[in-house]
Amino acid sequence: MARYTGPSCKLCRREKQKLFLKGTKCLSEKCPLEQKNYAPGQHGLTRRAKFSEYGVQLREKQKVKRIYGLQETQFHNVFETANRQKGITGGNLIKLLERRFDNVVYRLGFAPSRKSARQLVLHGHFTINGKTVDIPSYILASGDVVAVREKSKKLDAIHNSLRRTKDNVYAWLSVDKATLSGTFLNVPEREDIPLNANEQLIVELYSK
């Protein structure tokens, strides 16, 4: 499957907000968005984009898709799953994205970014309920326990990330740094998820 291999910081500049794609760099003075808060390209500074209704909806979809690191087909499949579930489709979409294995690893603090978390998962460094899982898109259920594999407990990348992470930041997660494990306690409510996005615009886009 094709994947984006270009500069991650350009994606943040395109959306004109931090998407936290580069981990600690996003929190430092080295973040390009601090010096170049305008769209990339030779006309990024001078052009004033006027978006149509469709354009606004598209930018919101692109932003959320990039935050969670999904390709278009993957993102659309998640939306279709959310649309089949009971409740508000937009809220269901965000909840499903939060329940992805790579996102949970990132939220627990085992990786500095979702991209790093995805790589660690693909390399088989984590288990779910004692079984090794290397599928980043795996959807966790309430009570699932995520742990670092015994052979991977000395990885500097994991320890360095944990040192920069506060304990139990999210109400739906519980992390134990001593045992390098965490528990997905329950599916969070939309209002508890720290995501600056209007998912209703995405629903309207896909409903056209």
Image (cartoon, rainbow, N blue to C red):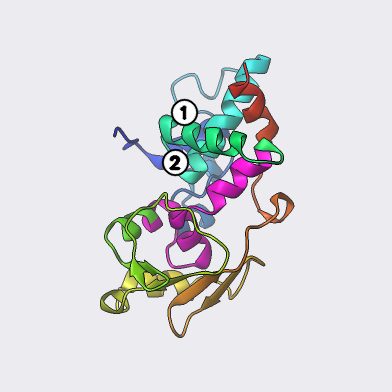
Residue at image point 50% right, 71% down: 164
Front-most of 177 and 122?
122
Residue at image point 56% right, 45% down: 18
Q: Work out whether residue 62 can be spotted.
A: yes
- Residue type, label 2: Cys
Q: Tag 1 or tag 2, which sits nearer the N-term?
A: 2
Q: Residue 203, how many percent across, how many down?
A: 64, 28
Q: Work out whether residue 25 can be spotted.
A: no
Front-most of 54 and 94?
94
Task: Kindly give the residue lying farthest to the bottom in the view shown.
Answer: 178
Q: Residue 73, how many percent across, how many down?
A: 42, 30
Vertical position of residue 70 compared to residue 120: above or below: above
Q: Is residue 104 magenta?
A: yes
How crowded is the residue under tag 1: few (<14 C-alpha within 10 Å), some, or many (20+)?
A: some
Mark 1, residue position:
40
* Residue 8, quarter of picture: top left
Report the disc number at residue 9: 2
How crowded is the residue under tag 2: few (<14 C-alpha within 10 Å), some, or many (20+)?
A: some
Q: Is residue 103 magenta?
A: yes
Magenta span of residues: 90-117
Left or right, 142 with respect to 193, comes to left
Residue at image point 69% right, 32% down: 200
Q: Residue 187, how many percent across, how many down?
A: 63, 58
Task: Kindly give the residue lying farthest to the right in the view shown.
Answer: 191
Left or right, 63 with respect to 147, comes to right
- Residue type, label 1: Pro
Vertical position of residue 68 compared to residue 16: above or below: below
Provide the secondary structure element on which disc 1 rests: loop
